[in-house]
Each structure stands twice: as C-alpha cells, then as structure tokens.
Image: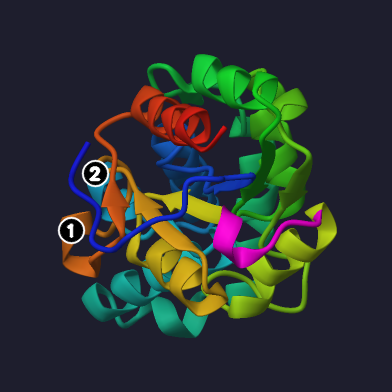
Amino acid sequence: MRRAMSPEPTDWRLLSFDLDGTLVDTAAEIAEAANRALESHGIERRPVDDIVVLIGAGTRELMLKLLARCFVERPELVERTRLEAVLDSLDQHYADTTGTCALPYPGCIETLGRLKAAGMRLACVTNKEIRHARRVLDATGLAECFDLVIGGDSLPEKKPHASVLQHVMQSLGVGAEQTAHLGDSATDVAAARNAGVAAWAVPYGYNAGRPIGESRPDRIFDNLPEVAAHVLEARRRAA
C-alpha cells in the first residue's frame, strides 16, 4: 500500500467500488464482443490491446471510439457503416460473452466478505450498462456482496459526475467524510474528487495504459486485501 496523499478519517462506513479492472478482469470478454460486432459488419478484428485501452466509459462509448480508429485507417468504411447497427450488434454479442470468462481479482471475494461482515455498506458503481454489470456480478458470485449497484445508465449522469456518488451516499445514508471510492482509472479518481469522498485506487486495470499515480489518488492499494486491512484497522483504532 502506498502512502496517503492527504489525511484520512478513521470511521469508514461506506466503500464504493468500480467493477471492470478493479474487482473483476473482464477485458477478454469485452474485447471478444467488440470484435464480433466489427466482424458482423465486415470490419476486421482489432488486437485486444487496442480495445482494452478504451474500457471505462461503457460499451457504447468504447465502440464509438473503436470505430473512429477504424475510420481513420480505412475512410471508405464511413460511407457503408451504420453506427447504430454496429452498436446494436455489440449489445447482442456482449450479452453472449458477459460473464463467460470474467475473473475476480485475487482476494476480491474475501475482501468484500470481510468488509461486509464488519458492517461496512458496499456499493458497486460502474459505467458499464446495468444489465451487463449485473450479469458480471452474478457470474462471478459477487452480486450478494453489495447493498447497491449503479450502472452507467442507472442515473441521468455517470462517472465522473458528482451526482453519481452523491446518489450512492444519499441512498445508503452515509456522509462524504465516511466514504471512499476505489477504482482503477482517472475517471474513478475524478468521480471521487467531484463528490468530495476519498479517492482510492489500484495500480492494475484499464487506465488507458497510463499509471494511476498520475491522477494523484489519495491512496493506492497494491491489491484488494490491503483495502480491507486498511479499513478494518482504522475502524479498530476508532473503536
């Protein structure tokens, strides 16, 4: 665990977690769905790495950015490609691949279990569409861990808008001073900052290939078990 960037409270009551790249490795199934969508419209598959760097804003935004790259390389595709048709294809293919090879990161289930047993309120806040998010959570056995799950289409706005985590806090009855959000990307750090909660991060995941330290989160945890250890020790000292 890296040193905190700023002082922290000790009486944590609510932790919000990003999903993709934070709790669960979903890169392979997202990339496969995107490539199937491209192929179904006569566009060549892309390397997995080209797709992984686009993860974080939801599947619709991912595909739009991916298509933009394809159009730059092959301008003739613009005239014969219907954006909405490709997006519809992605939704259909992702329904087939979601949860098929998603893997919780080491210590994920144990971490959430320890926190829940200690009385922490837990939320999963992702920009993935809620129907896909729930399928990933069900497939990985994480669904029962959370008091609240928010997808990218659950509210009028999505991360990093302040209203998202504010909605979580209001729904679960916890103030900003007792809340932290853990994610893997600059979007998650900004979401926490905008809502006035502690911005925590993990150094793995899908941050467009950039080190998460560049976003200056309040604290970086090397792995998920460190999160539980930190929170529970802080609560023990506060007791």
Image quarter hosting the C terminus: top right
- Seen at 60% across and 78% down, the residue is 162
Residue type indicated by callout 1? Gly
- Seen at 40% across and 33% down, the residue is 227
Question: Residue 33 at x, y = what percent?
Answer: 52, 42
Q: Nearer the viewer, residue 20 or 115?
A: 115
Label 1 CA crowd tier, 10 Å (few <14, some 14–19, many 20+): some
* Scheme of colours in the image: rainbow
> Could you tell which of marks 1 and 2 lies nearer the N-terminus?
2
What stretch of residues is rendered in magenta? 173-178
Label 2 CA crowd tier, 10 Å (few <14, some 14–19, many 20+): some
In the image, taking residue 210 as reference, residue 208 lies left or right, namely: right
Q: Nearer the viewer, residue 79 or 152?
A: 152
In the image, taking residue 161 as reference, residue 198 lies left or right, namely: left
In the image, taking residue 4 as reference, residue 63 lies left or right, namely: right
Question: Residue 174 at x, y = what percent?
Answer: 73, 57
Question: Residue 205 at x, y = what percent?
Answer: 32, 43
Residue occupied by mark 1: 213
The answer to whether 38 is drawn above or below residue 87 in the figure is: above
Residue type indicated by callout 2? Pro
Image quarter hosting the N terminus: top left
Residue occupied by mark 2: 203
